[in-house]
Amino acid sequence: MDFKRIELIFFAAFAALDIFLAVSFFQNNSDVHPTSANTNHSATILNEMRDDSISFKKPSNKKGQGYYISTQTSGTKQLKAKMEKLSGQSAKMADGEIISTFNTPLTLDVKNPDQTLNKVVQNSDEIVNGKSYQYDKATSTDSQIIYTQKISGQRIFSKSGQIRFKVNSANQVVGYTQVYLTNAQPLREKQDTISQERAIIWLYQYNEMPNDTVIEWSRLGYTRLLSIQKGSVYVPTWYIAIHGKGSSALQYYRINAFTGVIMKYSTQVSSTSNSSSTTSSSQDDSSLLNQAVSSSQRAVESSTEESVRSTTNRGSYNNSYSSNESSGTSSKTSANTTSSGNSTNAINSTSVSTSSEVQ
């Protein structure tokens, strides 16, 4: 038996095994490295925020999920018919919004306004479809008590889908405005949203969070992204409230939970004047919604992102970090965009205009 030959065979086999194990180790290590690096970056930036005297509770780093959702403002005829049956108030309708004044102002429990208003909201003789709304303490103020609808299990952070009760200086509720949304439908498959931690960090990096600031709260909900002829499109949004130390006046910011962009615009999409677009079927409307989201969101948010990011000068911010963090979301968005057919025709058949605030 040739022992030297056997020895060489074993040596070669073990060498090959060592090489295989080494390659596997480095591949696995490289997969873990970006996550570890991102975690370290987040910790570094959060420490910088504390060094800048920004106070906050430890934010969650868990990603969520959400949809682009289309809704319709409740049909004017049906809503108006219910409105006309309301008692104890003078109500009118304008553009799908109920505007009402109570005949006798309601005395409010200042510490617990919901104890007074829950009974009103739940009473179909006083509020249309009131059982669809819930008291929102976080966004209510001394002069305005807010009740919100929910879509996909999350609150709406826009005037549409809310009841806003007006409170006078004597702590009396004198009236309200109401918009009711129906037919909430997801436009696409569920997508990942950025974490609470990422939203707060990006707001800081956008220079929207000055030193000596307190982050009062940050909540995930839905904000109107687009207004269309027959309804609106909503997007998951991180809604963040901050105030200066020594001040109780809150400032509110909205971060698109898909892209991380600060939402400073509300986009309106309307069909052009050709007859085929104005007589479209419900299927065509659904297609328009999908394509309008793709084209308009890209146009508005990319310009917003460039202008905001260009002002960023926080010391340790690393643009490559934000690129790595959002690459998964970006690829999903891109894939969904290309999957909706005839996007070029949709862009040509819609006109886009922006207003100065998100409503």
Image (spheres, rainbow, N blue to C red):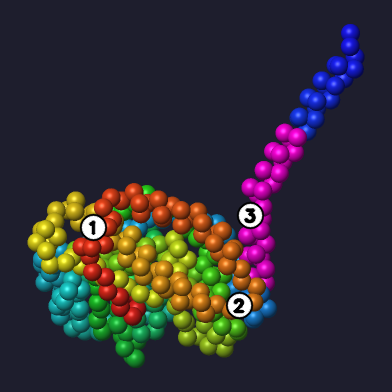
Amino acid type indicated by mark 1 = Asn
Q: For the residue labelled by badge 3, is the local secondary structure a helix, a strand or a loop?
A: helix
Image-quadrant location for residue 40: bottom right
- Please tell me which residue lies in front, 317 or 132: 317
Question: Is 158 located above or below residue 337 in the figure?
Answer: below
Identified at 53% across, 88% down, the residue is 247
Per the image, the residue denoted by label 3 is 34
Distance of label 1 from label 3 (alpha carbons): 39 Å
Per the image, the residue denoted by label 2 is 314
Q: Is residue 208 inside the magenta stretch?
A: no
Q: For the residue labelled by badge 1, is the local secondary structure a helix, a strand or a loop?
A: helix
Image-quadrant location for residue 244: bottom right
Distance of label 1 from label 2 (alpha carbons): 41 Å
Q: Magenta stretch?
A: 19-47
Residue lying at the far bottom in this picture: please name it.
Answer: 169
Per the image, the residue denoted by label 1 is 345
Q: Is residue 239 visible?
A: no
Rendered location of residue 148, percent (x, y): 33, 68
Q: Is residue 38 inside the magenta stretch?
A: yes
Amino acid type indicated by mark 3 = Pro
Amino acid type indicated by mark 2 = Arg
Give the side of residue 178 with respect to residue 75, left or right. right
